[in-house]
Image (spheres, rainbow, N blue to C red):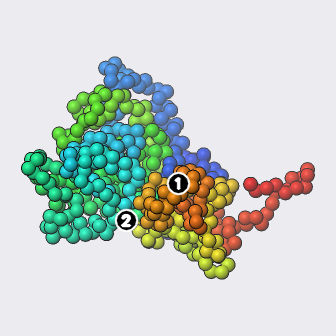
Amino acid sequence: FSSQYGYNGKIDSIRENEYPQLKGSVYLDHSGATAYAKSVLDSFTNDLTNNLFGNPHSYNPSSQLTSQRVELIRARILRHFNANPGEYQVIFTQNASSAIKLVGEAFPWTFGQSSFRYLREAHNSVIGLRRFAEENNSPDIQAITEDDLETTFKNIQEGSINDNLHPEINHEINHDTVYNLFAYPVQCNFSGQRFPLIWTKIIKKSDSDKSKVLVLLDAAAYVATSPLSLADKDISPDFVAISFYKIFGFPTGLGALLVKTELTPVLKKRYFGGGTENLSDRYEDGTINFLEVISLEHAFNSMERIYTGFHFIKNHVTALSAYLYRQMNSLRHWNGSPVCVIHANNDFSDSSIQGPVFNFNVKRADGSWIGYLEVEKLASVSGIHIRTGGFCNPGCLSRWVNVKSDQVIANFKTGKVCGDDHDIYNGKPTVPIKSCHGFTIPLSSTWPVTSQGLLYDREWMLVNLRTGKALSQK
């Protein structure tokens, strides 16, 4: 097994001491919400017990203490992402989706001229920005593929004006700079596929005084298990959306939007519900969730103490993912047909192109599909926590499971809705199954799978000594 696994042999002690809530469970929904460490809760509770934190919009001692701690956390966040405090500002939001929505609200749309492009693998939160573009009569709103981008990049490198990101500008009616928006995830939440940060640099090569592209990076899934550096100004995006419960498990109602300071005079404030001219305060309407913000100090401290650095977490989850891929890919039925159809185009060994998200469907020996609901129920009985569904990513559902728009409409007309039990339609799976590895998973917590199924499953029974009857495993 890879030497990158297990934090130099500490994984079992880390799990026992920091994650007692995981005892008896195989938790594989880390991209949904990762597990919180006990030391974070203990340290935060002690902080609340020994300090009085007041509303930061006052000037009394408790208010001033809160304000000081909040500003320290903003600096800590920037330091975590290697972001220059002079180049980025931290705006606290409810979650990553709220951060992305804020981009749409504050973006300097030019009516009838600004374009909005997003990668096909984007989350629904990004796709939702279409509405802002539509309200501003955007002439160009579309999802694009990696192949589309490669063509665009080639045109940019060759100096072509037809680069597909800068629409034709009518300067007879507009003499100001037209801003266009391009959004993509650095890691796809559906498949775990990763995309390069250097895209930002290539895209901005075609900027001019007349037309510019601002880049929004959805980093929520990526930063949960990997370090993200914004130190290189040439490749750093204009907006970065993150969610803290994806990283720490706690707090759960807090995200952030990292925004380049140079955009301060460009962004448009649509609603004023408090705040100041400072970029962070200006877009934080009302009182922020200051206690949860303060809890981040304890979350950062615990993560650094337990794991030393996020590169160790990245190494651990990569080793786990590569191991799982080898095991699942080798599973065969009695007739040699594969058990799993894995929705990926690599072997999970290279963390630069693949994150720890394992998306798959299961087949019977005759090639027919096993519905996600059946798999999920069997996993739940065995204490295995997995996730099923479309994962708010219609582009990837179409790409990997071949669920097209007409099928989605047909499924809906027959009663199919998100979260129901309709897992097979016309012999095809409606959505896949997802296993997401986190920093707390040891290899010893897995249940080995053989060609007959889970090892020892249905080969033993519990007998009620009083009645002599076997107890159902369900």
40 or 273: which is nearer to us? 273
| Amino acid found under the numbered disc labelled 2 | Ser
Q: Could you tell whether 351 is left or right of 110 in the image?
A: right
Q: Quadrant of residue 258?
A: top left
Judging by the rendered image, the residue that carries numbered circle 2 is 352
Q: Residue 193 in the image: x percent, y percent?
A: 41, 63
Judging by the rendered image, the residue that carries numbered circle 1 is 412
Residue at image x 32%, y 41%? 102
Q: Could you tell whether 130 is left or right of 115 in the image?
A: right
Outermost residue, top side: 60
Q: Could you tell whether 42 is left or right of 126 in the image?
A: right
Question: Dot 1, how many residues are within 10 Å of its Cα: few (below 14), some (14-19), or many (20+)?
Answer: few
Q: Residue 29 in the image: x percent, y percent?
A: 53, 53
333 or 326: which is nearer to us? 333
Question: Dot 2, how many residues are within 10 Å of its Cα: few (below 14), some (14-19), or many (20+)?
Answer: few
Q: Residue 90 in the image: x percent, y percent?
A: 30, 41
